[in-house]
Amino acid sequence: MTESIRETIRETICETIRARRALSNAAIAERNAAAVAAIMTDDVTVAVAGGPVLNGREASRLAFAEQMGEAGFRGYVRTPDVVEVAPDGSAATERGRWVGRWQVRRRVQEQHGTYVATWRHVGEAWYIASEIFVGAR
């Protein structure tokens, strides 16, 4: 395989991961916890900024469902800055920024920070295997 073909494959993987992240953001905006969790591996690990470590797709789905059930919840948006693909194309790392919004009385409050996610290629699709969210002070 030529370097040109390898680079094209890496670019396609990066675009696919960015598109999957956009689907995840859209599912959060729609308050669809099941769709958010569907983009995760069964054994996903999520370290919540200032909160617990969630182990497994179902734990993540339940945590999202709980937050989405709150009247003041306005959502999260995760914005990838960098996606790097492993040499063999089986995994990737995404780094970026996140923001969460909640309505408190008449004002919208925000929390924000950075995150890193690892993605695994399983079957024909890419899934989030782990996420670490760090809040900014």
Image: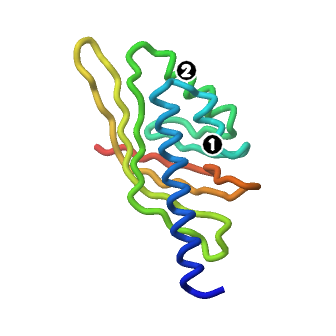
Question: What is the x, y in percent for residue 93?
Answer: 53, 62
Looking at the figure, which quarter contains the C terminus?
top left
Disc 1/disc 2 C-alpha distance (Å): 18 Å
Question: What is the x, y in percent for residue 135?
Answer: 37, 43
Tag 2 residue: 66
Name the front one of labels 1 and 2.
1
**Three-letter code for the amino acid on which mark 2 is drawn:** Glu
Report how many numbered discs are placed on residues in the image: 2
Tag 1 residue: 39
Looking at the figure, which quarter contains the N terminus?
bottom right
Q: Nearer the viewer, residue 134 or 26?
A: 26
Secondary structure under tag 2 reads helix
Rendered residue at 66%/32% (across/down) = 59
Rendered residue at 51%/62% (across/down) = 14
**Three-letter code for the amino acid on which mark 1 is drawn:** Ile
Residue 111 occupies quadrant: top left
Rendered residue at 64%/50% (across/down) = 127
Residue 49 occupies quadrant: top left
Q: Callout 1: 10 Å neighbours few (<14), some, many (20+)?
A: many
Query: Would residue 46 appear left or right of 123 to someone viewing this image?
Result: left
